[in-house]
Amino acid sequence: QVQLVESGGRSVQVGDSLTLSCAASGVTASTFALGWFRQAPGEERKFVSAVRWSEGTPYYANSVKGRFTVSRDVAKNTLALQMNSLKPEDTGIYYCGVQTSVGEPYGFWGRGTQVTVIS
């Protein structure tokens, strides 16, 4: 059973940096990808970044390219998101999710961690 626990969110100022972490129990070597998604108030959850679990290939939404870096530690089953040059539009609840196979939707959502960027 996959369980995800996000942490690291807090209130920061515009331009600050922040690192989010996701502890992912139940993830195996056959898991296709883990990803980060953001849900702003009144909006749907949207893709931010992902990494192919076995290969480490990263993917980013255009809005965060060059500012965010996703990484994973396969031995520790953890996923991280380094966020630099934060903007008010980065505000939201950040969730990590698991894509078990290519083409499958992300699932097994954690409870999320709140990031608030104050201008």
Image: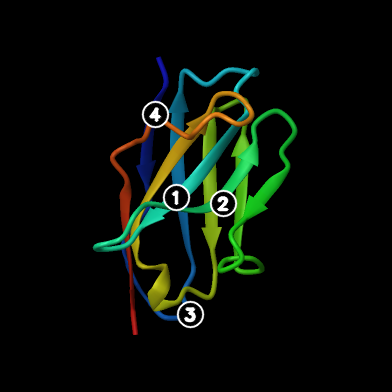
Secondary structure of the residue carrying tag 3 is loop
Residue 23, how many percent across, how many down? Answer: 44, 33
Question: What is the spatial separation of the Cα atoms under label 1 and label 3, in whole angstroms?
Answer: 20 Å
User: Is 109 placed above or below 31 here?
Assistant: below
What coloring was used for the rendering?
A: rainbow
User: Camera-side residue: 54 or 15?
Assistant: 54
Rounded to the nearest whole Å, what is the CA distance between mark 1 and mark 4?
Answer: 12 Å
| Disc marking residue 49 | 2
- The local secondary structure at tag 1 comes to strand
State the image quarter where residue 41 is shown: bottom left
State the image quarter where residue 97 is shown. Answer: top left
| Residue type, numbered disc 2 | Ser
Q: Residue at 73% x, 42% y: name it.
A: 57
Mark 4 or mark 3, which has the lower sequence index? 3
* Kind of residue indicated by mark 3: Gly
Residue marked by disc 1:
37
- Is residue 3 placed above or below 72 in the rendered structure? above
Mark 3 or mark 1, which is nearer the start of the sequence? 3
Image coordinates of residue 20 in percent, x first then y, are 45, 51
Most extreme residue toward the bottom, as rendered?
119
Q: Are marks 2 and 4 in contact (CB under 8 Å)?
A: no
Left or right position of 8 against 106: left
Contact between labelled residues 3 and 4, with CB atoms less than 8 Å apart: no
Kind of residue at disc 4: Phe
- Circle 4 is placed at which residue position? 108
- State the residue position of label 3: 15
Q: Residues within 10 Å of mark 4 (few under 14, many from 20)?
A: some
Residue 2 left/right relative to 102: left
Which residue is at a point 71% across and 38% down the rendered structure image?
56
Crowding at dot 1, Cα within 10 Å, few <14 / some 14-19 / many 20+, comes out as many
